[in-house]
Amino acid sequence: MTQILAALFTNVIILLTRMTTAVQAHWIGCGPDPVQRIYYANHASHGDFVLIWTVLPPAYRKKTRPVAGADYWLTGPIRSFVAINIFRSVLIDRQKFQRGSDPISLMSNAIDAGASLILFPEGTRNTTDTLLLPFKSGVYHLARKCPEIELVPVWLANLNRVLPKGEIIPVPLLCTVTFGTPLKLQPDETKIDFLARARKALLSISPEASMENETSK
């Protein structure tokens, strides 16, 4: 019964996401290739990973797990069912003093089991006027522990306007998911240098960067 409900909810979520956002995927730096990856994206809404998950080919979607906050997704039976049975989320306790498991180990174990991951290096939703918050160090430590896995920057546009913070009912609006060029941690690359390079790669595929490039031509 759980599997039947999960399959039904999956189809409903994908349908509603596409109807609400008319989401378009732009693979500009890579293609939807059948390789294991870490997709890292900007974060402005609880629906961010749903948008990425929706545009992945079905075969890859089944092997891709979002990294999400346990404190949000385990508050209530419906959220828990969605997080665990539909998205198979890697749930991280964001309160350090309450953690029973190391977040990097949880993520690397999922990768070792064959999963790709979706994560948000900012660590929290960006509700400021800043285009992208500084990255937390977790993405560096994960890249260091899984150096063979490529990291793909993913820019999400407009989803924060579809589902603003505190709102339940989405506002229909076109959203885009732009996939950039994969990168890997280089030998002897420092944490500061890697985080700066990964953040720059993500910013480079934002609509604002594209507008600046067009203006400079």
Image (tube, grey):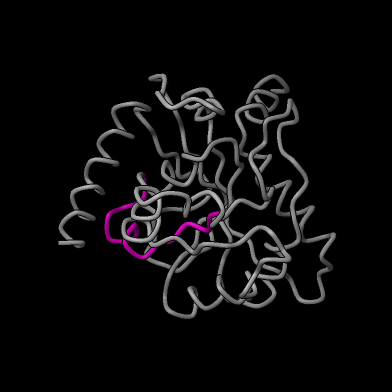
Q: Is residue 139 above or below residue 127?
A: below
Q: Nearer the viewer, residue 127 or 167?
A: 167
Q: Quadrant of residue 64?
A: bottom left
Q: Quadrant of residue 85?
A: bottom left
Q: How many marks?
A: 0
Q: Which residues are magenta?
A: 55-69
Measuring from the top left, give residue 142's x and y in whole percent. 65, 70
Q: Nearer the viewer, residue 176 or 28?
A: 176
Q: Is residue 84 above or below residue 200?
A: below
In the image, taking residue 171 as reference, residue 135 lies left or right, namely right
Residue under the point 69% across and 23% down: 217
In the image, taking residue 170 as reference, residue 103 lies left or right, namely right
In the rendered image, the quadrant that contains the N terminus is bottom left
Q: Nearer the viewer, residue 14 or 193?
A: 14
In the image, taking residue 90 as reference, residue 84 lies left or right, namely left
In the image, taking residue 123 as reference, residue 9 lies left or right, namely left
Q: Is residue 166 magenta?
A: no
Residue under the point 75% across and 55% down: 136
Q: Is residue 65 magenta?
A: yes
Residue under the point 79% across and 52% down: 196
Q: Is residue 165 above or below residue 87?
A: above
Q: Name the residue at the front extreme.
A: 76
Measuring from the top left, give residue 137's x and y in whole percent. 76, 61
Residue under the point 42% across and 67% down: 35
